[in-house]
Amino acid sequence: MGLDLTLFMADWERLGAMPVGERIDALHDAVWPPGDDESLRCPQSRGWWWPPDPEGGWCAVYEFFTTTGSYRPHSRAGDGWADMRPLVDAPVREAMDAFLSGLIWDEDPDEDPALSGGEGFFPPSSDPWRPRLLLVCPPEAMERKVSAWKAAEPCLDALRAPFAAECEGWVGRPDTFEGFTALLREWGDVVGEAAGRGWGLVGVP
């Protein structure tokens, strides 16, 4: 897709107190303050990266271990799930749907909250091909996603055959089952961290 993904975790109350049009810039400025050394703008290790200034401790950015920063692996995983889900037993399918919806997959893409600016929490994008946001997941959705992931994670191996049937060897789909499940587990960790703090997630291109 030619996009990168910068994934922020943020205190929704603190973010919501700011003017709508300033919220995306505020996330960037908190993690990478203007005027700081440019070399500090790229995390030196994977995982959570916290602002150098304690005043910016209301948000953090996550660097995935299993990707190079591109949004493409997440998009491919979402497309792969869309292909696989008809072959998956209902309980696992429902848990995976609940977990992945709004993160890397949407049952109805036209209702994706990221496309509408997080249902008013962020400015809407006027160009779907150059979105302002890739995902918006507010705090109230986090506990549901934690529960869904707890149900889905023990059943990941049940996705191996559907993955082989619908993804292996197909352009635009995850390359390996192990890579696909590793990315899902990272998302599980991200959601768990945000839920534990009562914060939300924002994905910026």
Image (cartoon, helix red, strand yellow):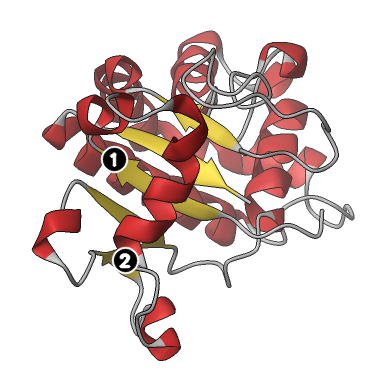
* Residue 50 x, y percent position in the rendering: 23, 64
Q: CA distance from mark 1 to mark 2?
A: 15 Å
* Residue 76 x, y percent position in the rendering: 73, 47
Q: Nearer the viewer, residue 114 or 89?
A: 114
Q: Secondary structure at mark 1?
A: strand
The label shown at residue 10 is: 1
Q: Amino acid at mark 1?
A: Ala
Of the numbered discs 1 and 2, the one sitting upstream in the chain is 1
Residue 158 appears left or right of 47: right
Q: Quadrant of residue 114?
A: top right
Q: Nearer the viewer, residue 88 or 114?
A: 114
Residue 26 appears left or right of 128: left
Residue extending furthest right?
A: 171
Give the labeled residue for mark 2: 47
Say how many tags the image has.
2
Q: Is residue 144 above or below residue 62?
A: above
Q: Residue at x 58, y 55 (%)?
A: 5
- Pointers 1 and 2 in contact (CB under 8 A)? no
Q: Residue at x 22, y 32 (%)?
A: 14
